[in-house]
Image (spheres, helix red, strand yellow):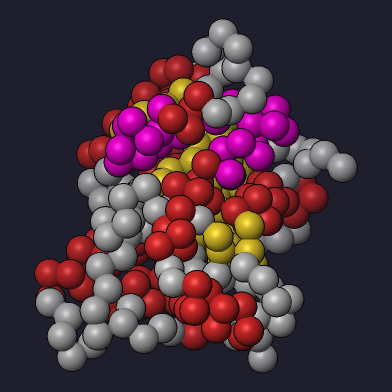
């Protein structure tokens, strides 16, 4: 069954994990592919322009290279986000009606050993970056008089339950949920819905380096008994982008196979 009502074009913003270059690209690429398959014109924005172009080349429905586009963007920079939105509006003559915001880096360490700069950097990208993107897209939609929009921010189940060695990441992703709920309350009068997707243990290039012993232990904790697939996260993003979710805002949807439920 298709996903009706996805806007004519959408923006998917990704930011690679510093500790695992390209590790966060699996979910972002899957989201781009899914939305493109539904007929959306996709803007792939990434801090690594080469990675964005690789995703661009994988998108369906753009044989002449005229439907989709790739761009470099640093979500932690207000000027960079502003320039990205200006570029999008110049190309498509309107702001994105759907934005899937996937900004995220990890700089892991235990609480007792974590450097202040590492804490600040993760919060700057994951939380402040999400704020700048949500604010920029919402401002553009309101300014052009759009009657609806969908902003989806990909957080993490870690933001809800915590994780050893990820105090900065967990704090930033918890903040993203609070940011999203507040944005949903403020922007609903403009027809803009804001929601979070919280992935659990998902099979991506980053997990390829995780020892089999650790993978087995994690699977044993998941009621469905397996790791998630990037396409399963993309499916939830596509739902939230569509008219099927027209009465859903301020929600956090867990894609975890039941991990940490209860």
177 with respect to 258 (left or right): left
Q: Residue at x 55, y 83 (%)?
A: 217
Residue 170 location, quadrant: bottom left
Q: Which residue is the extreme one toward the right?
A: 1
Residue 64: x and y, percent? 56, 8
Magenta segment includes 162: no
**Foreground of the two, 37 or 222:** 222
* Quadrant assignment for the C terminus: bottom right
Q: Decide if residue 155 is in sight here.
A: yes
* Quadrant assignment for the N terminus: top right
Magenta segment includes 52: yes
Residue 54: x and y, percent? 44, 30
Residue 42 location, quadrant: top right
Q: Decide if residue 157 is in sight here.
A: no
Q: Is residue 114 above or below residue 100?
A: below
Span colored in magenta: 30-53
**Foreground of the two, 118 or 124:** 118
């Amino acid at each position: 069954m298709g996903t009706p009502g996805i806007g004519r074009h959408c923006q998917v913003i990704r930011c690679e994990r510093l500790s695992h270059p390209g590790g966060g690209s699996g979910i972002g690429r899957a989201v781009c592919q899914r939305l493109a398959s539904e007929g959306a014109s996709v803007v792939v924005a990434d801090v690594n322009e080469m990675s964005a172009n690789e995703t661009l080349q994988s998108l369906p429905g753009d044989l002449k290279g005229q439907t989709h586009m790739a761009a470099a963007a640093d979500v932690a920079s207000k000027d960079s986000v502003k320039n990205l939105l200006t570029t999008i509006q110049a190309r498509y003559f309107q702001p994105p009606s759907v934005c899937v915001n996937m900004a995220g880096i990890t700089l892991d360490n235990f609480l007792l050993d974590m450097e202040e700069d590492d804490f600040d950097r993760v919060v700057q990208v994951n939380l402040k970056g999400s704020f700048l993107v949500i604010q920029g897209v919402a401002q553009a939609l309101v300014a052009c008089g759009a009657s609806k929009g969908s902003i989806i921010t990909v957080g993490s189940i870690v933001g809800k339950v915590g994780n050893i060695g990820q105090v900065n990441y967990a704090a930033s992703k918890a903040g993203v949920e609070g940011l999203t709920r507040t944005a949903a309350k403020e922007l609903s009068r403009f027809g803009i819905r804001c929601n979070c997707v919280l992935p659990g243990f998902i099979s991506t290039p980053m997990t390829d380096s995780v020892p089999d012993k650790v993978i087995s232990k994690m699977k044993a904790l998941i009621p469905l008994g397996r790791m998630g697939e990037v396409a399963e996260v993309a499916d939830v993003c596509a739902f939230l982008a569509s008219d099927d979710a027209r009465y859903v805002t301020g929600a956090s949807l867990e894609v975890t196979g039941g991990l940490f439920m209860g």
